[in-house]
Amino acid sequence: MNGQGAFAGALLSPEMPCPEQLRGPAGRHATRRFDVYRNNVTVALTEALAAAFPVVQRLVGEAYFAAMARDFIREHPPRSPVMALYGAGLPGWIERFPPLAALPYLPEVACLEQARREASLSADAAPLDPQALAGLSPEALAASAPRPHPAARFLRTRHPALAIWARNAGRPDLVQRPAGEVLVTRPKLSVLTCAAPIGTAATLEALARGLPLGAALPAGADHSAIFACLFSAGAVISEGDPKP
Amino acid sequence: MQSRTLPNTAGVGFKSVHFEDLADPGAVSWLEIHAENYMVEGGPRLAMLDDLRTRFPISVHGVGLSIGGEGPLDPAHLARLRRLIERVRPAQFSEHLAWSTHEGAYFSDLLPLPYTAATLDRVAAHVDEVQQHLGLRMLLENPSSYLVFEESTLSETAFLDEVSRRTGCGLLLDINNVFISASNLGTSAQGYLADYPVELVGEIHLAGYAEEDDGQGGPLLIDTHGAPVADPVWELYAEVISRIGPRPTLIEWDNDVPEFRTLEVEAARAARVMARRRAA
């Protein structure tokens, strides 16, 4: 292999030699100089991951995060120059990374950070005003089919990931939250993160499939609590809104 | 005050932490953004940009097109770029003489290419394609170099000159890169600038570098964009401005981003260099 294939192959593989056709001044070998590019690539991609997953980085420590990121980057270099979205696969990768099995909550914290990032970059839309539904009969309300807001994300956690995230993200209001469902939204420009009643995730999944509210709210769940949560967080848009 | 051309004044690379500071921009009269940071669907980033573009001329600077790449340009990325350009309606668009993508993997760095007849054909074809697709005349920026390719047969200045001759593109002269490359490759920055087709310059970049050891007893300058512009770079800048007159001049500071006031002081210094030329 030669040309950019050799250069690209050696960039993320420190065990590979510096490509042969590269030279320093006066025809000297360029190993140290090629390492500048290796270092630039690893540092830039590690920084992109650290910016997206600051709480994960805090939980494992900067040095561990950098080492872990190096492994992730070699297996999953970005497939797009839009770095705002790089690392979407990191939560799943952490879950399958044996050395981190002792921190079973870590993949969930990473999922929460990814959800917050996605919410921040998603399309803008005006959340559905609950007043718009206020005059509806119970039957008409059950037949209405609001859709999830493009920025709405949810998680079902088995560990107190929200509390762990909150403790490390300066959110004292959420540090007592137990395991359960978490809702992330961005009704305007700020990302909101809150604990959600059981059944909120299932409701949003059903609304995303186009089901009406009456069929979307799961049996046995606290419908009014779910309803209040979805509307106060701005998690739904009107069924009539054009698809973003 | 949105302008269709960049003014011959000083600008800075926009960082979101400086958004509030731009209520009092001082010597900063235009802004440059990295295109890829705004290729998102919505949210606070785009909201800031929508606001800024009503107050400042904007230069869109791409870092991910991989114009020097062996493979074809990514049509999805070109489409994203076009959407952004249509939204921002910038005063200028620029990209790099470099590659950053290979077989779909993106390396988030500006990687070097040999200067040969074959790479010249490829770069010129890519520049042509970008200009056709975006419907504008772009500027192409000289890279910072740490090494050379044995197979190169053309000088960088001849290469840039010929790309421009074939495509009609303008050039973005990064004087920090000129200084870094000359130091790292043991050549002359003044000699480079004497050969460089300065009449094609539509914008100038100034930035800071870091100095490391090249492992062979000499310095190796690293293009960090994380420090004030160095004195020898200011001297080269003054020489260029005295030759060609004021040009849109950007202070780039992308790492260890300082307070806005620090950037503004650098922009004011560039403005003073241009003012001295105007008065001369």
Image (tube, coloured by chain):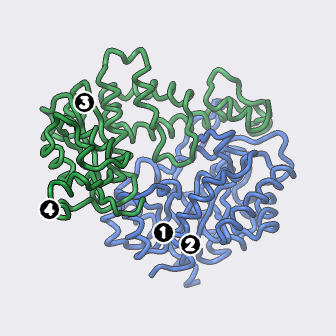
Chain colours: A green, B blue
Q: Residues within 10 Å of mark 4 (few under 14, many from 20)?
A: few
Chain letter of disc 2? B
Numbered label attached to residue B248: 2
**Cα gap from disc 2 to disc 1, whole angstroms:** 7 Å
**Cα gap from disc 3 to disc 4, whole angstroms:** 35 Å
Confirm or deny contact between disc 2 and disc 3 (CB under 8 A).
no
Q: Residues within 10 Å of mark 3 (few under 14, many from 20)?
A: many
Numbered label attached to residue B11: 1
The location of residue A122, given as percent across then percent down, is 39, 53
Amino acid type of the residue that numbered disc 1 sits on in the rendered structure: Gly
Residue at (67% x, 74% y) in the render = B243
Chain letter of disc 3? A
Q: Secondary structure at mark 4?
A: helix
The location of residue A179, given as percent across then percent down, is 20, 28
Same chain? Circles 4 and 2: no
Chain letter of disc 4? A
Closer mark to the observer between disc 2 and disc 3: 3
Numbered label attached to residue A161: 3
Amino acid type of the residue that numbered disc 3 sits on in the rendered structure: Ala
Confirm or deny contact between disc 1 and disc 4 (CB under 8 A).
no
Confirm or deny contact between disc 2 and disc 1 (CB under 8 A).
yes
**Cα gap from disc 3 to disc 1, whole angstroms:** 43 Å
Amino acid type of the residue that numbered disc 4 sits on in the rendered structure: Ala
The residue wearing badge 4 is A134
Residue at (62% x, 63% y) in the render = B94
Based on the displayed image, in which of its 4 quarters is residue B91 positioned?
Answer: bottom right
